[in-house]
Amino acid sequence: MDIKIKEEYVRQALKLHQESPAVDAHLDLAGEVLLRNLAGEHDVVKNHYLAHFRTAGINLALSSIYVENGSLDRAWDNALDQIKALKEDVAGMKEVLLIQSKADLEKALEENKIGIMIYMEGLDCIGEDIDRLDILYGMGVRGAALTWSRANALATGCCKASEHRQISGALTEAGIRAVKKMEELSMFLDVSHLNDEGFEQLCRIAEKSFIATHSGSRCIYDNYRNLTDEQMDALAAQGGIMGMNGCVYIAGSFEGNHLEMLCRHIEYEVEKIGAKHVGYGFDLCDSYDFAKAALSGKRPEKRYDCLLNHGQIPLLSAALLQRGMGLEDVRCIIGENFINFFKKSL
């Protein structure tokens, strides 16, 4: 049984989401746009996301560029195809602004636009060619994770969300150079898929703040995609933020208690490292999976998202308020923390 939210808290949360910036720090949007384009569909953001973004008051969504295992043999071309598809999809939308600078972000906030920032969920596409980061930056990419849940030329990822096993492997020399290059370019670094050994090493070499765009607490649910208390402390100590993941496998809400588990993660994180270091990064993948299945003529077997769509994000904020979290803490979590981080990093 999940949380039953009183109407007064729903109204309060909806008002908060319209008056304060809201951020989703991880969404596989570009890949979904490309998949739907290949199936003959266009205006993907307009038709599938715009109304839900507006309901949640989203001012910034981070679109990942994620190359699937089956596309690794042409990873660079696939990554560029995703970037091109996303840019073309939103080119004519007055409601949307691609975020490449602090000025862009401030404009999105002032004019209440939906900002979309592109970042790489894994740098498999560059191999050991660190200079390709300059090319990606020139195309508007403003951050990256070294790897997804697999090993590449730069680092080793943790296990997949559906697994439970420790994977060893340090950053390679090329990976260390990539971190330094990203810091030179002011590209943010995402550690959500990095393995424990790589995380520890990164803490020693990073000179700038980094974030976990879509990870929860490993204490609340024991999954290697979540952060340990020690990792949370390290993240907070260097000014980072962790975005709460909305995948059932990572939240641990297998009994349908989605809001309850999301709240438990966030409340624990706030208790341990403070509300200033917590945000939303839901990684809602069902729409992506349906697009992928439609292209292959199949249907996905089940849904994995804790929320049906972005329009339900205020329900989580309402649940946090109903359970006693203060209004200012919730305001920080729904978006202010990530907004402040990117104002500094861009």
Image (cartoon, rainbow, N blue to C red):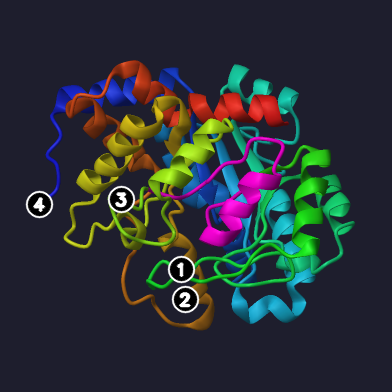
Residue 12 lies left or right of residue 23; in this view the side is left
Q: Is residue 121 visible?
A: yes
Is residue 194 shown above or below 55? Answer: below
In this rendering, the label closer to the viewer, 1 or 3: 3
Residue at image position (36%, 16%) is 328
Is residue 339 shown above or below 96? Answer: above
Give yes or no for contact between labels 1 and 3 (Cβ–Cβ under 8 Å): no
State the residue in front, 37 or 139: 139
Residue 337 lies left or right of residue 264; in this view the side is right
Residue 140 lies left or right of residue 196; in this view the side is right
Q: CA distance from mark 2 to mark 3?
A: 34 Å
State the residue in front, 246 or 97: 246
Where is residue 52 drawn, in percent x and y? 42, 41
Q: Is 201 part of what is drawn in magenta?
A: yes
Secondary structure under tag 2 reads helix
> To which residue does mark 1 refer?
289
> To which residue does mark 2 refer?
293
Q: Is 341 part of what is drawn in magenta?
A: no
> To which residue does mark 3 refer?
219
Give yes or no for contact between labels 4 and 1 (Cβ–Cβ under 8 Å): no
